[in-house]
Image (cartoon, rainbow, N blue to C red):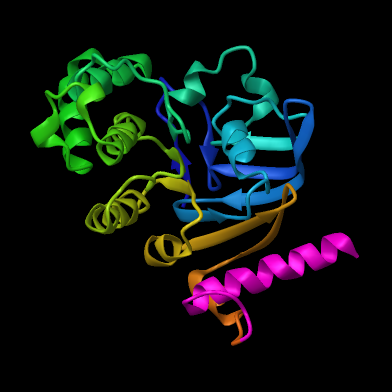
Amino acid sequence: MVRTLPEAAVAPATWDHAVQAHGLQVRAGRHLAVTGLDLRLGVGVHGLLGPNGAGKTTLMRALATVLRPAGGRLELLGRPAHELRADLRPIRRMMGYLPQEFGYYPKFTVREFVAYMAWLKEVPTTDVAVATERAIARVGLTDRADSKLKQLSGGMLRRAGVAQAIVNDPALLLLDEPTVGLDPEQRLTFRELLRDLGADTCVLVSTHLVEDVVASCTDVVIVHAGRVVWQGTPAELADHGGTGDAGDSAAERGYSALVRQARREAGA
């Protein structure tokens, strides 16, 4: 699929991979957390897995243009990252991002918060109200739209964070641990939302929950020590596991086997 960005965004540009990285290096403070990563992502829902310290959050922050690459090459929506340094606004109009911990104004209502984020992302003024209500409805918070953020439970607050990330109908959506605090029913609903979003958007979801990846993702990326060590479908992930591997499902056993292999190769 080749997607053309609106003239007001990043024009003229076309892309068939929303994310292209080759030899990407990114620092987290003084530590080189992403150490030479190769990655291509197109339209669909991509699950990002890896042990603690693998570089997942640093990678997400680089893709969200929060961190600058320290080396290698990165293209976002058809534009090299180094070309975006002067003005990040055009590319950010086309992105949605939910970090692990997102900032918000506690006294804002859900509606005020999502509308404010729409304004920051330069959604046309005439479209803000409709876009806000739609985003709130998609995360199941319509009945709490007038509640202040400080009054929400952890799961509801997380859903408000997802709403602000999708309010501008992004071409690239980055979600870092989006299901933290969600109950089982909310997680099932969120999986449906991911599948819907992935029909015409490049969605990257970082999580520790392999079952969420299997249920909602078209593609799985595993990182270890700052590099991609495996990429494939959920079915292919399940095929890598054996009876001796840790996990309650075939996919979890496959993930355990691949991480163990990556650790072994890193130590060789």
Magenta segment includes 241: no
Query: What residue sits 25% from the left and 37% below the top?
Result: 156
State whether residue 10 appears in this view. no
Q: Quadrant of the C terminus?
A: bottom right
Magenta segment includes 250: yes
Closest to the observer, 211 or 116: 211
The magenta stretch spans which residues?
Answer: 244-268
Q: Position of residue 73 (x, y in %)?
A: 74, 36
**What secondary structure is the magenta-colored segment mainly?**
helix
Query: Which quadrant would residue 24 be assigned to in this image?
Result: top right
Q: Is residue 79 left or right of residue 169?
A: right
Query: What residue sits 36% from the left and 15% below the top?
Result: 120
Query: What residue sits 47% from the left and 36% below the top?
Result: 100
Q: How many marks?
A: 0
Q: Residue furthest right?
A: 268
Closest to the observer, 210 or 133: 210
Taking 85 as reference, is 223 above or below it? below
Q: Position of residue 59 (x, y in %)?
A: 63, 39
Q: Residue furthest bottom?
A: 243
Query: What residue sits 62% from the left and 79% below the top?
Result: 245
Q: Is residue 116 left or right of residue 27?
A: left
Q: Position of residue 253 (x, y in %)?
A: 57, 76
Query: Which quadrant would residue 267 be assigned to in this image?
Result: bottom right
Q: Position of residue 224 (x, y in %)?
A: 71, 54
State whether residue 232 appears in this view. yes
